[in-house]
Image (cartoon, helix red, strand yellow):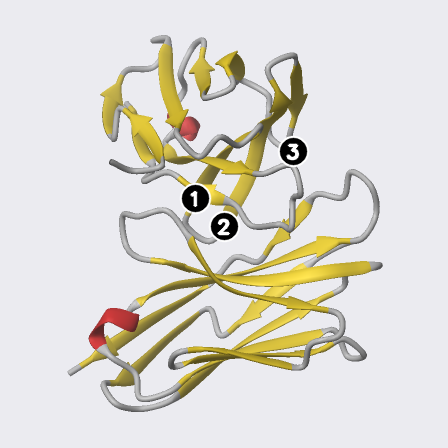
Amino acid sequence: KNQVEQSPQSLIILEGKNCTLQCNYTVSPFSNLRWYKQDTGRGPVSLTIMTFSENTKSNGRYTATLDADTKQSSLHITASQLSDSASYICVVRGNQAGTALIFGKGTTLSVSS
Amino acid sequence: DADVTQTPRNRITKTGKRIMLECSQTKGHDRMYWYRQDPGLGLRLIYYSFDVKDINKGEISDGYSVSRQAQAKFSLSLESAIPNQTALYFCATSDVRFTGELFFGEGSRLTVL
């Protein structure tokens, strides 16, 4: 069964600290993986997309990694800011016609001052 | 103005009432989706439409119906609302290339008493 598991479920860190969010998936064959950021009361917004051939991609203070062999991805946030407080959702797309998007349940990050 | 607009943003109703949530988009995308989000369960697909004449059920379509009035408009109806339909509902769009990126509206929070 195609699944996406995210950990931890929630995380609290101090402003300025780094953190790493994990995403493990069983979707096969694999097309791509996206990380979305969802601010409280808002719709999710794509942060980055990882395809099979990509290992690392950065978007400002956000760095995503992908290990297609172990079916794992991580999202590393550097020098966290209060505005990073949000839910981060991992979404995997399979590589077959009509394949649905498989959503993780998200990690809720709280950055405190 | 937002690219994907949902109305109403908040609605409180009673069991048995008919409710319609509306979505309009200015992105020019052919594909539109309705998701619901519940704490601990993540985003789940209710219905999706690839063009005006194409409507498909998602994983949790029971108790819901949709109408695609035009390329830019996609509405979700609850014919007889029940309390376990209390949730945050999101409309989303994607383009025909479907790299997997979804563009979400701001959400409609529905409470059924």
Residue at 38% across, 24% down:
B24
Looking at the rendered image, the quarter that the C terminus of chain B falls into is: top left
Q: Position of residue B89 (x, y in %)?
A: 40, 34
Q: Position of residue B63 (x, y in %)?
A: 53, 17
* Image quadrant assignment for residue B75: top left
Dot 3 and dot 2 within a common chain: yes
Q: Position of residue A29 (x, y in %)?
A: 84, 59
Residue at 52% across, 45% down:
B102
In what element is the residue under mark 2? strand
**Residue A50 higher or lower than A79, as above or below:** above
Q: Left of A106 or right of it: where is B57? A: right
The residue under label 3 is: B59
**Residue A19 higher or lower than A35, as above or below:** below
Looking at the rendered image, the quarter that the N terminus of chain B falls into is: top left
Tag 2 and tag 1, C-beta contact below 8 Å = yes
- Residue B62: image tag: none
- Residue B42: image tag: 2
